[in-house]
Amino acid sequence: MRKKIVAGNWKMNKTYEEALSLVSEIDNMVKDEVNGDVSVIVAPPFPFLQSVGKLTQGNEKMHLAAQNVSEHESGAFTGEVSASMLKSVGVEYVIIGHSERRMYHHEDAEMLYKKMKTTIAHGMKPIFCCGEPLEERDADRHFEYVGKQLHDSLSYLSNEEFDQIVIAYEPIWAIGTGRTASSEQAQEMHEYIREQLAKMFDAEAAYKAVILYGGSCNPANAKELFSQADVDGGLIGGASLKSRDFTDVIKSF
Ligand code: PGA
């Protein structure tokens, strides 16, 4: 059995007070309502990481993620946050290669590779995001596109490094649009991703890899998506900002 994960990507939302009440609500609901073996990850903005982490410390189901990390170790990089800083405030996972960062911050495959290397070297786990834009889907090139994203950023990692990675498939046309991939579209891409991983690493490692679906995943569609053989959970944006919705997604396995 593969690990099940639901991760909430808060993006650039919430003030300090709002962040603390959101995470307290999630923490309580998870304690009261979630029985199964599922890891819940919250990814608040940088300034709230430490306080959010402290609030969830006593709950073994809850884990802390950052939304980004610098590829550099330390030094004169104004505005950046390093892996050792994240590790020192209790971060366990780092979202790397989200389509918004690839698009608005021009993060390329080599930079993402370096971010994964430093994240793993500091004892944290990357959540590596991939996914095609609408024009690639419409032109029936989505498999090729995602395959290249995986190959370009992951293929230089060692087997041991790969073991630390969680993959998130997020078709760009489904992010924040209310348009979800159908469960068939998600399953066929997740299966393809696993096949590619088996070619790059080994079959057992690929079989064990956790592959999350992201893109307008919510309490109404999570059950069907999570019931697919190769969908091991979700990376949730909009629906992770409401404790009730997020908990209902967590309970959808
Ligand atoms: P969404 O975002 O759930 O709001 O579509 C998902 C994501 O970008 O991680």
Image (cartoon, grey):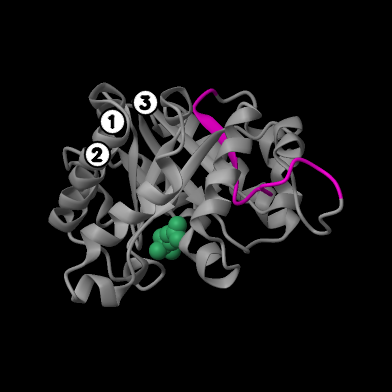
* Circle 2: element type: helix
Image marks 1 and 2: residues in contact by CB distance under 8 Å: yes
Magenta stretch holds residue 100 = no
Which residue in the structure is indicated by mark 1? 206
Residues rendered magenta in the picture = 60-75
Give SS at disc 1: helix
**From what the image shows, is residue 98 above or below residue 155?**
below
Is tag 3's residue or tag 2's residue first in the polypeptide sequence?
3
Q: Residue extending furthest right?
A: 76
Residue type beneath disc 1: Ala
Quadrant in which the N terminus appears? top left
The quadrant holding residue 148 is: bottom left
* Residue 108 x/y as whole percent: 52, 60
Residue 199 x %, y %: 25, 35
Dot 3 or dot 1, earlier in sequence: 3
Query: Which residue corresponds to mark 2?
Result: 194
State the residue in front, 166 or 78: 78
For label 3, the residue is: 35
